[in-house]
Amino acid sequence: MLTLLHNDMEDDAERRGFYEVAYGNQLRFHEGDVISTNNQRRFANAQYLASVTVIVLYTSTILTSIYLMCSISLLHGAVKYKKEYIFPWIVAAMIDLLLLISAIIIGDGYPCVINLFNGHNMYHFTCALFVASFVYAICAVISFSMEVSAMQCARHFADERGERLLLLDHAAHSSLLSAAQLNKLSHGTRTHFV
């Protein structure tokens, strides 16, 4: 991307009739008798912005794809109400959050990292967004886990209640039968006992 930008700048300079003159470490572009350093400044700014954009895009794409792959693979079992897949995801996310916070603290001491984000304010804002997205994802998974466990408890309680009702129904049915048999036996003749 940077080479394409550089080639475009050179082509534009050739079309306009610019030519380079080197003075030690300083390059100046001339058109006739007028010295023009605007193109050089524009190219330096464009090159810096292009490199920052490429780094941010690649980094965010890689982090997002890794995060999504881990989330999908670990939450696949949670959709099937298997709670044992949710707990490792939460533990891994907590460890990742601690690593992210430590990387943010370490990166704050390096000016080259701060310059990639164009200053301290943008660095802190971007890091706050990363941390907030991690915390949101962890809270969402924890609430999903609590909802799944509540549904499992309610289903288990309903199953127990249904079993209890079935046992009570059997007991009542049996007691009614035995009461009817006792009544029949008490009013019956001796031939019924034989």
Image (cartoon, rainbow, N blue to C red):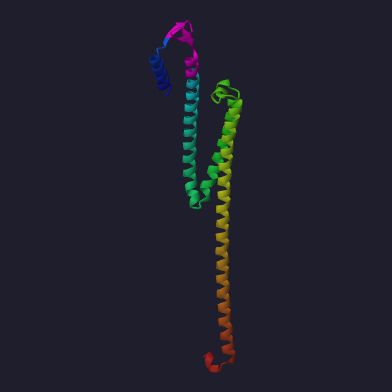
Q: Is residue 155 above or below residue 145?
A: below
> Residue at 57% across / 81% down in the picture?
176
Is residue 27 visible in the rendered structure shown here?
Answer: no
Q: Is residue 85 magenta?
A: no
Which quadrant, please, contains the N terminus?
Answer: top left
Q: Is residue 30 magenta?
A: yes
> Residue at 59% across / 90% down in the picture?
186
> Residue at 56% across / 22% down in the picture?
115
Q: Is residue 62 above or below residue 34?
A: below
Give the x, y percent position of residue 3.
41, 20
> Residue at 58% across / 42% down in the picture?
136
Frontmost residue, 49 versus 185:
49
Res. 117 image quadrant: top right
Tell me the magenta residue range: 20-43
Res. 190 image quadrant: bottom right
Frontmost residue, 60 versus 21:
21
